[in-house]
Amino acid sequence: LDGPSLPTAVAKTTARLSAEGQIGGLRASVHAQVDEDSKKTASQGILAAFGGGDIRLDGQIDGDDGGALVTLLGLDKIVTVGKQPGFVNVLATGKAGGALQVEGRIIAGALDAKAAGTAKVGGDQGSSADLRLDVAHANLRLPGDNAGAVVGLPLTLHGRLVVSKEAAKLDSL
């Protein structure tokens, strides 16, 4: 926690959190930072003030087995990948409690995809997202493929993914 000894109109208080570790054979790291006006943190208290502060969240998971990464994310039900190294990273910035600018990428074996747009977590309307989705390459799992074959139906996709508490819609293909 960093901040000025006396709050001023332009001073910011910053809270930072970093964590690194392993999940099975995968390495994970997350770094978060929240900035807020020091006068607000002095008058409302740190936790209350940071509820509307500027947030930056940066996370990555990587490992030598892209298949384990895809399984961890639950994507193994729809895509097949080999055991080549892989990673997923996500960056979110914006006002805490508001819509965040997000971008993310995953590369694991034959899977190469990225997304960018806005997302909101929680609130009265529930969580939502409006993302530009670009799948440069993926192998879709074929129906009835329970053996986990690496060969699948090749897919390249560019479109818009809109998610609300009622539905998920993929359009502008």
Image (cartoon, rainbow, N blue to C red):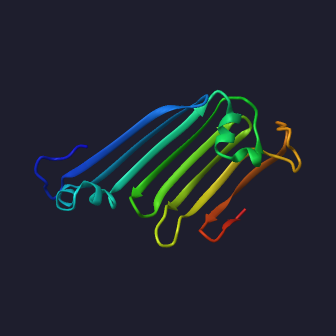
Farthest residue toward the left? 6
Query: Residue 8 is drawn in which quadrant?
Result: bottom left
Residue at the image point whose x is 17% and y is 59% from the top: 39
Horizontal relation, residue 163 to residue 29: left or right:
right
- Name the foreground residue: 59 vs 132: 59
- Name the foreground residue: 85 vs 43: 43
Residue at the image point whose x is 76% and y is 45% from the top: 79
Residue at the image point whose x is 23% and y is 50% from the top: 13
Where 67 falls versus 144 (above or below)? Answer: above
Percent coordinates x, y for residue 106 in the rendering: 63, 42
Farthest residue toward the right? 144
The quadrant of the image that shows the C terminus is: bottom right
Percent coordinates x, y for residue 47 in the rendering: 29, 55
Percent coordinates x, y for residue 110 in the rendering: 74, 37
Number of marks in picture: 0
Percent coordinates x, y for residue 22 in the rendering: 53, 30
Where 41 falls versus 26 (above or below)? Answer: below
Farthest residue toward the front? 24
Query: Residue 38 is drawn in which quadrant?
Result: bottom left
Horizontal relation, residue 77 to residue 90: left or right:
right
Residue at the image point whose x is 70% and y is 46% from the top: 75
The quadrant of the image that shows the N terminus is: top left
